[in-house]
Image: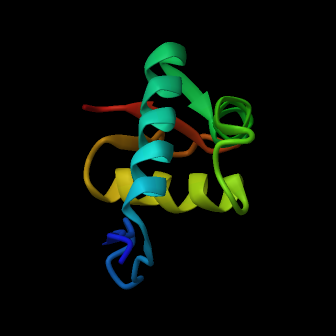
Amino acid sequence: MEEKILTKHPDRGKKGVNISRAKYDTVREAILAVVRERGEITFDELGEAVEKKLRGRLDGSIMWYVTTVKLDLEARGFLRRIPGAAPQRLIRLK
């Protein structure tokens, strides 16, 4: 049986989703590596960079996984949105 992880959501009233632990770990590594390389990044740039890194390595919508794991990383304190930035910009905290 495949191991799952229940993701978190930064908005306290919203729930995360159950996803494959292996896919979560793959996307998490890619997101944190991209943000570490770039310092500050827009959500669109993050999605493009992660898609490029993971193309052919992940079944399903890579952008869906990027969005889900990014929200989880925000909730866990690894990423932070820059307040008031439009488009949405992110920085790495841990």
Report the colour scheme.
Answer: rainbow
Q: Residue at x 32, y 77 (%)?
A: 12
Query: In the rendered view of the protein, which quadrant contains the C terminus?
Result: top left
Q: Which percent across, then down, holds residue 50?
A: 64, 36
Which image quadrant for residue 41?
top right
Query: In the rendered view of the protein, which quadrant contains the N terminus?
Result: bottom left
- Residue 81 is left or right of residue 3, and the answer is right
Q: Residue at x 66, y 62 (%)?
A: 64
Which image quadrant for residue 84?
top right
> Looking at the image, is 92 positioned above or below residue 61?
above
Total marks placed = 0
Q: Nearer the viewer, residue 3 or 94?
A: 3
Q: Residue furthest top?
A: 37
Q: Nearer the viewer, residue 93 or 83?
A: 93
Q: Residue at x 68, y 58 (%)?
A: 59
- Residue 5 is left or right of residue 41, and the answer is left
> Looking at the image, is 69 positioned above or below residue 47?
below
Q: Residue furthest front?
A: 1
Which image quadrant for residue 14?
bottom left
- Residue 21 is left or right of residue 89, and the answer is left
Q: Nearer the viewer, residue 75 or 49?
A: 49
Q: Residue at x 71, y 63 (%)?
A: 60
